[in-house]
Amino acid sequence: MTTTRTTTSTHEHHPLAAAGEDGPRRSWAVLAVALTAQALVVLDISVVNTALPTIGEALRLRSSDLAWLVTAYLMTSGGGLLLGGRISDLLSRRRVFLTGMTVFSVASLLSGFAGSATELILARTAQGLAAALMTPAALSLVTTTYSGDQRRKGLVLWGAVGSLGVAAGVLLGGALTTWFGWQAIFWVNVPVSAVALTVAWRVLPVDRRAHAGLGQFDLPGAVTALGGLMALMLALGEAPSRGWLSARTLTVLAAAATLLAAFVAIERRSSRPLVPPHTWKVKTLVSGTTVMLGVTGLLVGAVFLTSIFVQGVMGFSALRAGLAFLPFAFAITLGTMVARHLLAHAAPRAIAGIGLAVVAGASVLLSRASADAGYAADLLPGLLLLGVGVGMVFVPVSVTALAGIPEQHAGLASGFLMTGHEVGAALGVAVLSAIAASAGSLLSAEGIADGFSRGFSGAALLAVGVGVIAVVTMPRTKVAAGGGGMHGHH
Protein backbone atom coordinates (compact mmCIF):
# COMPACT_ATOMS: atom_id res chain seq x y z
CA MET A 1 0.00 0.00 0.00
CA THR A 2 2.96 2.33 0.52
CA THR A 3 5.53 3.76 -1.80
CA THR A 4 8.82 5.56 -1.27
CA ARG A 5 8.34 9.31 -1.01
CA THR A 6 10.45 11.34 -3.38
CA THR A 7 12.08 14.53 -2.29
CA THR A 8 9.66 16.67 -4.28
CA SER A 9 6.18 17.03 -2.84
CA THR A 10 3.12 18.82 -4.08
CA HIS A 11 3.18 20.84 -0.90
CA GLU A 12 6.19 22.87 -2.01
CA HIS A 13 4.28 24.20 -5.00
CA HIS A 14 0.76 24.16 -3.61
CA PRO A 15 -1.10 27.51 -3.42
CA LEU A 16 -2.48 26.44 -0.03
CA ALA A 17 0.56 24.41 1.09
CA ALA A 18 0.28 22.69 4.47
CA ALA A 19 3.22 21.72 6.61
CA GLY A 20 4.01 18.44 8.33
CA GLU A 21 1.86 15.61 6.99
CA ASP A 22 3.49 12.92 9.11
CA GLY A 23 2.36 13.06 12.70
CA PRO A 24 1.44 10.81 15.65
CA ARG A 25 -1.16 8.07 15.15
CA ARG A 26 -4.56 9.04 16.53
CA SER A 27 -7.62 7.15 17.71
CA TRP A 28 -10.10 6.19 14.97
CA ALA A 29 -12.97 7.45 17.14
CA VAL A 30 -13.05 10.88 15.44
CA LEU A 31 -13.25 9.19 12.03
CA ALA A 32 -16.08 6.93 13.24
CA VAL A 33 -18.10 9.97 14.33
CA ALA A 34 -17.39 11.84 11.07
CA LEU A 35 -18.36 8.82 8.93
CA THR A 36 -21.58 8.40 10.90
CA ALA A 37 -22.48 12.01 10.09
CA GLN A 38 -21.62 11.50 6.40
CA ALA A 39 -23.72 8.31 6.29
CA LEU A 40 -26.76 10.04 7.83
CA VAL A 41 -26.55 12.98 5.42
CA VAL A 42 -26.05 10.87 2.28
CA LEU A 43 -28.66 8.28 3.26
CA ASP A 44 -31.24 11.02 3.66
CA ILE A 45 -30.81 11.98 -0.01
CA SER A 46 -32.12 8.63 -1.25
CA VAL A 47 -33.90 7.01 1.71
CA VAL A 48 -36.99 9.16 1.13
CA ASN A 49 -37.40 8.22 -2.54
CA THR A 50 -38.57 4.66 -1.86
CA ALA A 51 -41.05 5.87 0.74
CA LEU A 52 -42.59 8.73 -1.30
CA PRO A 53 -45.69 6.79 -2.49
CA THR A 54 -46.43 5.62 1.08
CA ILE A 55 -45.92 9.13 2.53
CA GLY A 56 -48.14 10.62 -0.18
CA GLU A 57 -50.92 8.17 0.59
CA ALA A 58 -50.67 8.57 4.37
CA LEU A 59 -50.66 12.39 4.36
CA ARG A 60 -52.79 12.79 1.19
CA LEU A 61 -50.06 14.81 -0.52
CA ARG A 62 -50.08 16.14 -4.07
CA SER A 63 -47.27 15.11 -6.41
CA SER A 64 -45.81 18.64 -6.17
CA ASP A 65 -45.65 18.29 -2.37
CA LEU A 66 -43.88 14.93 -2.72
CA ALA A 67 -41.26 16.47 -4.99
CA TRP A 68 -40.63 19.18 -2.38
CA LEU A 69 -39.78 16.55 0.26
CA VAL A 70 -36.70 15.72 -1.81
CA THR A 71 -36.04 19.21 -3.18
CA ALA A 72 -36.23 21.02 0.19
CA TYR A 73 -33.50 18.80 1.63
CA LEU A 74 -31.21 18.93 -1.41
CA MET A 75 -31.73 22.68 -1.82
CA THR A 76 -30.74 23.62 1.73
CA SER A 77 -28.01 21.01 2.24
CA GLY A 78 -26.37 21.59 -1.15
CA GLY A 79 -26.89 25.35 -1.12
CA GLY A 80 -25.50 25.83 2.38
CA LEU A 81 -22.32 23.72 2.27
CA LEU A 82 -19.92 26.53 1.29
CA LEU A 83 -21.39 28.65 4.04
CA GLY A 84 -21.21 25.81 6.57
CA GLY A 85 -17.60 25.13 5.67
CA ARG A 86 -16.60 28.77 6.12
CA ILE A 87 -18.43 28.96 9.46
CA SER A 88 -16.57 25.89 10.70
CA ASP A 89 -13.25 27.56 9.77
CA LEU A 90 -14.14 30.81 11.55
CA LEU A 91 -15.63 29.18 14.65
CA SER A 92 -14.83 25.92 16.43
CA ARG A 93 -15.27 22.86 14.16
CA ARG A 94 -16.25 20.81 17.18
CA ARG A 95 -19.00 23.28 18.13
CA VAL A 96 -20.31 23.59 14.56
CA PHE A 97 -20.37 19.79 14.16
CA LEU A 98 -22.19 19.21 17.48
CA THR A 99 -24.71 21.96 16.65
CA GLY A 100 -25.35 20.55 13.16
CA MET A 101 -25.86 16.98 14.39
CA THR A 102 -28.17 18.10 17.23
CA VAL A 103 -30.39 20.10 14.85
CA PHE A 104 -30.34 17.20 12.34
CA SER A 105 -31.52 14.80 15.04
CA VAL A 106 -34.35 17.09 16.22
CA ALA A 107 -35.45 17.77 12.62
CA SER A 108 -35.49 14.01 11.92
CA LEU A 109 -37.69 13.46 14.97
CA LEU A 110 -40.10 16.21 13.86
CA SER A 111 -40.19 14.79 10.30
CA GLY A 112 -41.62 11.52 11.63
CA PHE A 113 -44.29 13.36 13.64
CA ALA A 114 -45.31 15.61 10.72
CA GLY A 115 -49.03 15.52 9.96
CA SER A 116 -49.10 17.73 6.87
CA ALA A 117 -47.06 18.61 3.80
CA THR A 118 -46.03 21.97 5.29
CA GLU A 119 -44.77 20.43 8.54
CA LEU A 120 -42.78 17.73 6.74
CA ILE A 121 -41.26 20.13 4.19
CA LEU A 122 -40.20 22.54 6.97
CA ALA A 123 -38.63 19.68 8.95
CA ARG A 124 -36.79 18.48 5.83
CA THR A 125 -35.54 22.04 5.24
CA ALA A 126 -34.14 22.12 8.79
CA GLN A 127 -32.51 18.73 8.19
CA GLY A 128 -30.81 20.13 5.08
CA LEU A 129 -29.52 23.24 6.87
CA ALA A 130 -28.15 21.04 9.67
CA ALA A 131 -26.45 18.81 7.09
CA ALA A 132 -24.84 21.91 5.54
CA LEU A 133 -23.19 22.65 8.91
CA MET A 134 -22.37 19.06 9.85
CA THR A 135 -20.83 17.71 6.63
CA PRO A 136 -17.95 20.18 6.02
CA ALA A 137 -17.18 20.26 9.76
CA ALA A 138 -16.99 16.43 9.78
CA LEU A 139 -14.74 16.20 6.72
CA SER A 140 -12.45 18.99 7.92
CA LEU A 141 -12.14 17.20 11.30
CA VAL A 142 -10.88 14.13 9.41
CA THR A 143 -8.34 16.13 7.38
CA THR A 144 -7.04 18.11 10.39
CA THR A 145 -7.05 15.31 13.01
CA TYR A 146 -5.18 12.72 10.95
CA SER A 147 -1.99 12.78 8.93
CA GLY A 148 0.00 10.43 6.76
CA ASP A 149 -1.43 6.99 6.02
CA GLN A 150 -4.20 7.45 8.60
CA ARG A 151 -5.47 10.47 6.72
CA ARG A 152 -5.46 8.62 3.42
CA LYS A 153 -7.38 5.67 4.93
CA GLY A 154 -9.90 8.07 6.45
CA LEU A 155 -10.50 9.81 3.12
CA VAL A 156 -10.82 6.45 1.33
CA LEU A 157 -13.58 5.49 3.78
CA TRP A 158 -15.22 8.92 3.40
CA GLY A 159 -15.37 8.38 -0.36
CA ALA A 160 -16.75 4.87 0.12
CA VAL A 161 -19.53 6.08 2.41
CA GLY A 162 -20.36 8.91 -0.02
CA SER A 163 -21.05 6.46 -2.83
CA LEU A 164 -22.40 3.54 -0.81
CA GLY A 165 -24.89 5.68 1.11
CA VAL A 166 -26.87 6.53 -2.03
CA ALA A 167 -27.45 2.84 -2.89
CA ALA A 168 -27.93 1.79 0.74
CA GLY A 169 -30.55 4.52 1.20
CA VAL A 170 -32.86 2.89 -1.35
CA LEU A 171 -32.49 -0.49 0.40
CA LEU A 172 -32.94 0.98 3.89
CA GLY A 173 -35.89 3.12 2.80
CA GLY A 174 -37.70 0.13 1.32
CA ALA A 175 -37.09 -2.09 4.35
CA LEU A 176 -38.01 0.48 7.02
CA THR A 177 -41.12 1.68 5.17
CA THR A 178 -42.38 -1.89 4.66
CA TRP A 179 -41.70 -3.17 8.17
CA PHE A 180 -42.18 -0.12 10.42
CA GLY A 181 -43.95 2.61 8.39
CA TRP A 182 -42.65 5.71 6.64
CA GLN A 183 -41.92 7.53 9.92
CA ALA A 184 -39.12 5.05 10.63
CA ILE A 185 -36.96 6.40 7.79
CA PHE A 186 -36.65 9.63 9.79
CA TRP A 187 -36.76 8.27 13.34
CA VAL A 188 -33.87 5.85 12.71
CA ASN A 189 -31.61 8.93 12.59
CA VAL A 190 -32.40 9.85 16.19
CA PRO A 191 -30.76 6.98 18.16
CA VAL A 192 -27.82 6.90 15.71
CA SER A 193 -27.32 10.66 16.18
CA ALA A 194 -27.64 10.33 19.97
CA VAL A 195 -24.85 7.73 20.12
CA ALA A 196 -22.68 9.75 17.72
CA LEU A 197 -23.21 12.94 19.75
CA THR A 198 -22.29 11.17 22.99
CA VAL A 199 -19.07 9.84 21.47
CA ALA A 200 -18.34 13.14 19.67
CA TRP A 201 -18.64 15.13 22.89
CA ARG A 202 -15.86 12.98 24.39
CA VAL A 203 -13.49 12.46 21.45
CA LEU A 204 -13.66 15.50 19.14
CA PRO A 205 -10.58 17.67 19.65
CA VAL A 206 -11.11 21.05 21.27
CA ASP A 207 -10.04 23.67 18.75
CA ARG A 208 -7.06 25.60 20.13
CA ARG A 209 -6.85 28.01 17.19
CA ALA A 210 -7.41 31.73 17.71
CA HIS A 211 -10.81 32.09 16.10
CA ALA A 212 -11.44 35.03 13.83
CA GLY A 213 -15.13 34.84 14.67
CA LEU A 214 -17.99 35.82 12.42
CA GLY A 215 -16.69 39.39 12.38
CA GLN A 216 -14.45 38.18 9.55
CA PHE A 217 -17.52 36.93 7.69
CA ASP A 218 -18.40 38.24 4.23
CA LEU A 219 -22.16 38.57 4.75
CA PRO A 220 -23.13 39.88 1.25
CA GLY A 221 -21.02 37.11 -0.33
CA ALA A 222 -22.58 34.52 1.97
CA VAL A 223 -26.15 35.64 1.18
CA THR A 224 -25.64 35.68 -2.60
CA ALA A 225 -23.79 32.32 -2.57
CA LEU A 226 -26.48 30.67 -0.43
CA GLY A 227 -29.30 32.20 -2.48
CA GLY A 228 -27.69 31.35 -5.82
CA LEU A 229 -26.89 27.75 -4.92
CA MET A 230 -30.34 27.20 -3.38
CA ALA A 231 -32.02 28.62 -6.50
CA LEU A 232 -29.86 26.33 -8.66
CA MET A 233 -30.79 23.27 -6.57
CA LEU A 234 -34.47 24.29 -6.69
CA ALA A 235 -34.42 24.61 -10.49
CA LEU A 236 -32.68 21.25 -10.89
CA GLY A 237 -35.07 19.59 -8.46
CA GLU A 238 -38.18 20.85 -10.24
CA ALA A 239 -36.99 20.58 -13.86
CA PRO A 240 -37.91 16.87 -14.27
CA SER A 241 -41.58 17.47 -13.35
CA ARG A 242 -42.08 21.02 -14.69
CA GLY A 243 -39.91 20.78 -17.81
CA TRP A 244 -36.58 22.46 -18.61
CA LEU A 245 -38.21 25.12 -20.78
CA SER A 246 -41.11 25.93 -18.46
CA ALA A 247 -41.43 29.56 -17.34
CA ARG A 248 -40.88 28.52 -13.71
CA THR A 249 -37.66 26.58 -14.40
CA LEU A 250 -36.19 29.31 -16.62
CA THR A 251 -37.07 32.03 -14.08
CA VAL A 252 -35.43 30.18 -11.19
CA LEU A 253 -32.35 29.37 -13.31
CA ALA A 254 -32.08 33.05 -14.26
CA ALA A 255 -32.32 34.01 -10.57
CA ALA A 256 -29.59 31.48 -9.73
CA ALA A 257 -27.32 32.84 -12.48
CA THR A 258 -27.91 36.44 -11.33
CA LEU A 259 -27.19 35.69 -7.67
CA LEU A 260 -24.07 33.64 -8.46
CA ALA A 261 -22.80 36.39 -10.78
CA ALA A 262 -23.39 38.90 -7.94
CA PHE A 263 -21.48 36.56 -5.60
CA VAL A 264 -18.46 36.53 -7.96
CA ALA A 265 -18.56 40.36 -8.25
CA ILE A 266 -18.81 40.80 -4.45
CA GLU A 267 -15.97 38.31 -3.84
CA ARG A 268 -13.64 40.18 -6.19
CA ARG A 269 -14.09 43.42 -4.23
CA SER A 270 -14.23 41.93 -0.73
CA SER A 271 -11.27 42.19 1.62
CA ARG A 272 -12.50 39.04 3.44
CA PRO A 273 -14.09 36.89 0.71
CA LEU A 274 -16.14 33.80 1.53
CA VAL A 275 -14.00 31.82 -0.96
CA PRO A 276 -10.42 33.20 -0.98
CA PRO A 277 -9.17 33.73 -4.59
CA HIS A 278 -6.29 31.25 -4.18
CA THR A 279 -8.85 28.46 -3.61
CA TRP A 280 -9.48 28.41 -7.37
CA LYS A 281 -5.75 27.84 -7.97
CA VAL A 282 -5.78 24.55 -6.03
CA LYS A 283 -6.02 22.26 -9.03
CA THR A 284 -6.60 19.11 -6.97
CA LEU A 285 -9.60 20.70 -5.23
CA VAL A 286 -11.16 22.20 -8.38
CA SER A 287 -10.67 19.09 -10.53
CA GLY A 288 -11.75 16.79 -7.69
CA THR A 289 -14.94 18.78 -7.13
CA THR A 290 -15.74 18.72 -10.87
CA VAL A 291 -15.30 14.94 -11.10
CA MET A 292 -17.19 14.49 -7.81
CA LEU A 293 -20.11 16.42 -9.32
CA GLY A 294 -20.09 14.26 -12.45
CA VAL A 295 -19.79 10.84 -10.81
CA THR A 296 -22.39 11.63 -8.10
CA GLY A 297 -24.78 12.76 -10.83
CA LEU A 298 -24.28 9.49 -12.68
CA LEU A 299 -24.74 7.45 -9.49
CA VAL A 300 -27.87 9.19 -8.18
CA GLY A 301 -29.39 9.49 -11.67
CA ALA A 302 -28.81 5.76 -12.29
CA VAL A 303 -30.41 4.82 -8.96
CA PHE A 304 -33.39 7.05 -9.81
CA LEU A 305 -33.91 5.48 -13.27
CA THR A 306 -33.45 1.93 -11.96
CA SER A 307 -35.84 2.32 -9.01
CA ILE A 308 -38.56 3.60 -11.38
CA PHE A 309 -37.87 0.70 -13.78
CA VAL A 310 -38.02 -2.12 -11.21
CA GLN A 311 -41.23 -0.76 -9.67
CA GLY A 312 -42.97 0.54 -12.81
CA VAL A 313 -41.97 -2.17 -15.30
CA MET A 314 -41.11 -5.22 -13.19
CA GLY A 315 -43.74 -4.58 -10.52
CA PHE A 316 -41.36 -4.77 -7.55
CA SER A 317 -42.64 -3.65 -4.12
CA ALA A 318 -40.74 -0.96 -2.19
CA LEU A 319 -38.93 -3.66 -0.17
CA ARG A 320 -38.06 -5.78 -3.21
CA ALA A 321 -36.90 -2.66 -5.07
CA GLY A 322 -34.60 -1.89 -2.14
CA LEU A 323 -33.25 -5.46 -2.09
CA ALA A 324 -32.56 -5.18 -5.84
CA PHE A 325 -29.87 -2.60 -4.96
CA LEU A 326 -28.11 -4.87 -2.43
CA PRO A 327 -25.68 -6.41 -5.01
CA PHE A 328 -25.10 -2.86 -6.31
CA ALA A 329 -24.03 -1.75 -2.83
CA PHE A 330 -21.64 -4.72 -2.53
CA ALA A 331 -20.20 -3.84 -5.96
CA ILE A 332 -19.54 -0.25 -4.83
CA THR A 333 -17.68 -1.61 -1.79
CA LEU A 334 -15.61 -3.85 -4.06
CA GLY A 335 -14.83 -0.86 -6.32
CA THR A 336 -13.56 1.19 -3.37
CA MET A 337 -11.33 -1.71 -2.24
CA VAL A 338 -9.87 -2.06 -5.75
CA ALA A 339 -9.22 1.69 -5.94
CA ARG A 340 -7.62 1.76 -2.50
CA HIS A 341 -5.19 -0.97 -3.60
CA LEU A 342 -4.44 0.81 -6.89
CA LEU A 343 -3.71 4.16 -5.19
CA ALA A 344 -0.22 3.02 -4.21
CA HIS A 345 0.56 1.83 -7.75
CA ALA A 346 -1.25 4.14 -10.19
CA ALA A 347 -2.03 7.82 -10.67
CA PRO A 348 -5.41 9.11 -9.37
CA ARG A 349 -6.38 10.24 -12.89
CA ALA A 350 -5.77 6.70 -14.22
CA ILE A 351 -7.91 5.08 -11.50
CA ALA A 352 -10.75 7.58 -11.99
CA GLY A 353 -10.49 7.24 -15.77
CA ILE A 354 -10.73 3.45 -15.62
CA GLY A 355 -13.66 3.69 -13.19
CA LEU A 356 -15.57 6.05 -15.48
CA ALA A 357 -14.85 3.80 -18.48
CA VAL A 358 -16.42 0.94 -16.50
CA VAL A 359 -19.42 3.19 -15.67
CA ALA A 360 -19.83 3.98 -19.38
CA GLY A 361 -19.72 0.27 -20.28
CA ALA A 362 -22.23 -0.56 -17.54
CA SER A 363 -24.56 2.17 -18.80
CA VAL A 364 -24.44 0.72 -22.32
CA LEU A 365 -25.34 -2.71 -20.90
CA LEU A 366 -28.27 -1.28 -18.92
CA SER A 367 -29.52 0.72 -21.90
CA ARG A 368 -30.32 -2.57 -23.67
CA ALA A 369 -33.03 -3.54 -21.13
CA SER A 370 -36.58 -3.73 -22.54
CA ALA A 371 -40.11 -3.91 -21.11
CA ASP A 372 -39.83 -7.71 -20.70
CA ALA A 373 -36.39 -7.56 -19.04
CA GLY A 374 -35.49 -9.94 -16.21
CA TYR A 375 -33.60 -8.74 -13.15
CA ALA A 376 -30.84 -11.40 -13.06
CA ALA A 377 -30.19 -11.51 -16.81
CA ASP A 378 -30.75 -7.91 -17.90
CA LEU A 379 -30.18 -5.60 -14.89
CA LEU A 380 -27.81 -7.34 -12.48
CA PRO A 381 -24.68 -7.49 -14.73
CA GLY A 382 -24.96 -3.78 -15.55
CA LEU A 383 -25.62 -2.80 -11.91
CA LEU A 384 -22.61 -4.79 -10.68
CA LEU A 385 -20.32 -3.13 -13.23
CA LEU A 386 -21.78 0.28 -12.46
CA GLY A 387 -21.15 -0.19 -8.73
CA VAL A 388 -17.52 -1.21 -9.23
CA GLY A 389 -16.90 1.74 -11.56
CA VAL A 390 -18.49 4.32 -9.25
CA GLY A 391 -16.62 2.98 -6.20
CA MET A 392 -13.33 3.26 -8.10
CA VAL A 393 -13.93 6.97 -8.85
CA PHE A 394 -15.01 8.21 -5.41
CA VAL A 395 -11.80 7.03 -3.72
CA PRO A 396 -9.13 8.90 -5.76
CA VAL A 397 -11.32 12.01 -5.82
CA SER A 398 -11.80 12.03 -2.02
CA VAL A 399 -8.11 11.34 -1.32
CA THR A 400 -6.61 13.87 -3.73
CA ALA A 401 -9.13 16.75 -3.70
CA LEU A 402 -8.10 17.87 -0.21
CA ALA A 403 -4.36 17.17 -0.59
CA GLY A 404 -2.29 19.91 1.00
CA ILE A 405 -5.19 22.07 2.24
CA PRO A 406 -4.02 23.88 5.41
CA GLU A 407 -6.01 23.70 8.61
CA GLN A 408 -7.40 27.23 8.44
CA HIS A 409 -9.12 26.48 5.11
CA ALA A 410 -10.09 22.83 5.73
CA GLY A 411 -13.76 23.60 6.38
CA LEU A 412 -14.19 25.75 3.28
CA ALA A 413 -12.39 23.20 1.08
CA SER A 414 -14.56 20.41 2.51
CA GLY A 415 -17.70 22.46 1.83
CA PHE A 416 -16.44 23.17 -1.70
CA LEU A 417 -15.96 19.45 -2.44
CA MET A 418 -19.28 18.38 -0.90
CA THR A 419 -21.14 21.12 -2.80
CA GLY A 420 -20.02 19.25 -5.92
CA HIS A 421 -21.50 16.07 -4.40
CA GLU A 422 -24.91 17.64 -3.66
CA VAL A 423 -25.23 19.66 -6.88
CA GLY A 424 -24.20 16.52 -8.76
CA ALA A 425 -26.97 14.52 -7.07
CA ALA A 426 -29.62 17.04 -8.14
CA LEU A 427 -28.14 17.50 -11.60
CA GLY A 428 -27.95 13.75 -12.24
CA VAL A 429 -31.64 13.17 -11.54
CA ALA A 430 -32.65 16.29 -13.48
CA VAL A 431 -30.57 15.50 -16.58
CA LEU A 432 -31.12 11.74 -16.80
CA SER A 433 -34.86 12.00 -16.10
CA ALA A 434 -35.12 14.71 -18.79
CA ILE A 435 -33.35 12.40 -21.27
CA ALA A 436 -35.66 9.54 -20.22
CA ALA A 437 -38.77 11.72 -20.58
CA SER A 438 -37.72 12.66 -24.12
CA ALA A 439 -38.54 9.06 -25.13
CA GLY A 440 -42.24 9.73 -24.51
CA SER A 441 -44.73 8.96 -21.75
CA LEU A 442 -43.44 7.43 -18.53
CA LEU A 443 -46.89 6.21 -17.50
CA SER A 444 -46.83 2.84 -19.31
CA ALA A 445 -44.35 -0.03 -18.85
CA GLU A 446 -43.19 0.38 -22.46
CA GLY A 447 -42.75 4.11 -21.99
CA ILE A 448 -40.74 3.65 -18.79
CA ALA A 449 -38.57 0.99 -20.49
CA ASP A 450 -37.90 3.28 -23.48
CA GLY A 451 -37.04 6.13 -21.12
CA PHE A 452 -34.76 3.85 -19.06
CA SER A 453 -32.93 2.79 -22.23
CA ARG A 454 -32.51 6.34 -23.48
CA GLY A 455 -31.52 7.61 -20.02
CA PHE A 456 -28.69 5.09 -19.72
CA SER A 457 -27.52 5.81 -23.27
CA GLY A 458 -27.18 9.42 -22.11
CA ALA A 459 -25.42 8.26 -18.93
CA ALA A 460 -22.84 6.39 -21.06
CA LEU A 461 -22.03 9.57 -22.99
CA LEU A 462 -21.85 11.64 -19.80
CA ALA A 463 -19.52 9.06 -18.19
CA VAL A 464 -17.15 9.36 -21.17
CA GLY A 465 -17.22 13.16 -20.82
CA VAL A 466 -16.50 13.08 -17.06
CA GLY A 467 -13.78 10.48 -17.73
CA VAL A 468 -12.03 12.84 -20.14
CA ILE A 469 -12.20 15.64 -17.53
CA ALA A 470 -10.74 13.28 -14.89
CA VAL A 471 -7.86 12.12 -17.12
CA VAL A 472 -7.00 15.67 -18.22
CA THR A 473 -7.32 17.51 -14.88
CA MET A 474 -6.68 15.10 -11.98
CA PRO A 475 -3.16 14.45 -10.62
CA ARG A 476 -1.05 12.26 -12.90
CA THR A 477 1.35 11.23 -10.14
CA LYS A 478 0.91 8.57 -7.46
CA VAL A 479 -0.37 9.35 -3.96
CA ALA A 480 2.61 9.39 -1.62
CA ALA A 481 2.79 7.12 1.40
CA GLY A 482 1.71 9.96 3.63
CA GLY A 483 -1.48 10.42 1.72
CA GLY A 484 -1.24 14.17 1.71
CA GLY A 485 0.93 14.77 -1.33
CA MET A 486 1.73 13.43 -4.77
CA HIS A 487 4.99 12.11 -6.14
CA GLY A 488 6.63 14.63 -8.40
CA HIS A 489 4.77 17.46 -10.10
CA HIS A 490 1.27 17.95 -11.43
Image (cartoon, rainbow, N blue to C red):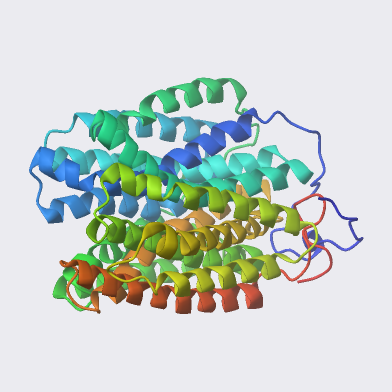
* Vertical relation: 365 (above or below) 112: below
Residue 252, image x and y in percent? 23, 68
Q: Residue at x 78, y 33 (%)?
A: 25
Q: Residue at x 22, y 75 (%)?
A: 250
Residue 380 location, quadrant: bottom left
Picture coordinates of residue 404, whole percent (x, y): 71, 55
Determine which quarter of the picture holds residue 234: bottom left
Relative horizontal placement of residue 8, taking residue 245 as reference (left or right):
right
Residue 147 in view = no
Measured as percent of width and height from the top left, residue 360 is found at 51, 73
User: Which residue occupies the foreground of this view, 148 or 16?
Assistant: 148
Q: Where residue 242 appears, x then y in whole percent?
A: 17, 69
Q: Residue at x 91, y 55 (%)?
A: 4
As drawn, is 257 to the left or to the right of 195?
Answer: left
Q: Is residue 439 visible?
A: yes
Query: Where 120 falls versus 250 (above or below)?
Result: above
Is 314 or 243 nearer to us in this picture? Answer: 314
In the rendered picture of this protein, how many numbered marks are placed on residues? 0
Judging depth in this view, the residue of 423 and 208 nearest the camera is 423
Residue drawn where x is 23% and y is 35% of the image: 182
Is 485 situated left or right of 412 in this image?
A: right
In the rendered image, which quarter contains the C terminus?
bottom right
